Image: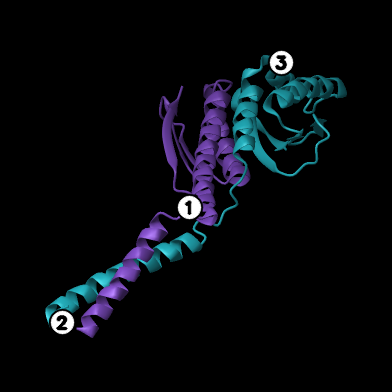
Chain colours: A cyan, B purple
Amino acid sequence: MPSLKKAQAMIIDGVLSLFLAIILSYSLFAAWPQDRHETGDLALERAGYDIVNAFYEDEMLYSTIARGLEFKGYLSGGEINSLSLRLYNYGKLLGVSRIDVDIEGSSSFSVQISSAPLTRREQFPVIIPLKGGADSRLIRVSLWR
Amino acid sequence: MRRGFAGLLVLSVFMLGFVFLLSSHSQYIASKNYRSMVSAEIHSDRIAIARNIITRSYRHVDEKGRVQWATSIVDSLSNSYGLKVSIDSSSYPVMVNVTDPSSGLSTSFSVS
């Protein structure tokens, strides 16, 4: 094999350095944690999308909460029972194990759908405008799986 | 001649290493890619959920309550959901911008 001239050696050095840099960068980025946020649960996130829509689109859910909060400022036991039953059905459809509802300025309640151990939770806000928007209540809905 | 051969040998080794690395299906790299995709989808879902909250709650708001509604939306979504919301309630239709500071995703839309 003929010996390499200086220019050829420099070109090979350059190509070698390039490959070395690419390999090192690839290894580094593959090993380095880029997204430091917890991944979260996609199924729960999608269930949250549906449950938030349900609070607004389900006339029974929305009117029970809005009427109770507007006229009394809180939800009665009967109203909570009706909401729990409705949310139980939604929970079964969405495949979640438990739904926690925390209404600002009123009571909180939970709906147990299955007895499976609870491992992950995602929380979603629902904002209910009262009196035409002059007052609003924040409801925190937590879905458990 | 020996020096030239050694250089070519090292170059070949690195090229082979590069090719193997690119085609590697290591579980760690695959799961990291999957986690990134899931994370991106979750961030996108959060913005979609915020958009739904804003558009659907606005249906129950009248002219007089628009400003208070906008204030409570901005406060609630930023405190409990970590999103940056800006609402121009003086315009009609009302213009909204929602940004997720952690991912940089944002969306602008109007509600009427």
Measured as percent of width and height from the top left, residue A58 is found at: 66, 17
Within 10 Å of disc 2 (Cα), the crowding (few <14, some 14-19, many 20+) is few
Circle 1: residue type: His
Circle 3: residue type: Met
Using the image, name the chain to which the residue with label 3 belongs.
Answer: A
The furthest residue to the top: A59
Q: Which residue is mark 2?
A: A3
The furthest residue to the front: A1
| A10 versus B88 height, above or below | below
B86 and A16: which is toward the camera: A16
Using the image, name the chain to which the residue with label 2 belongs.
Answer: A
Within 10 Å of disc 1 (Cα), the crowding (few <14, some 14-19, many 20+) is few
The part of the image, by quadrant, that contains residue A130 is top right
| A55 versus B13 height, above or below | above
- The numbered dot on residue B25 is 1
Alpha carbon of mark 2 to alpha carbon of mark 1: how far?
39 Å
Using the image, name the chain to which the residue with label 1 belongs.
Answer: B
Q: Secondary structure at mark 3?
A: helix
Same chain assignment for discs 2 and 1 = no
The part of the image, by quadrant, that contains residue A116 is top right
Foreground mark, 2 or 1, reads: 2
Q: Secondary structure at mark 1?
A: loop
Circle 2: residue type: Ser
- The numbered dot on residue A60 is 3
Residue for point 63% across, 33% down: A48
Residue for point 67% across, 40% down: A123
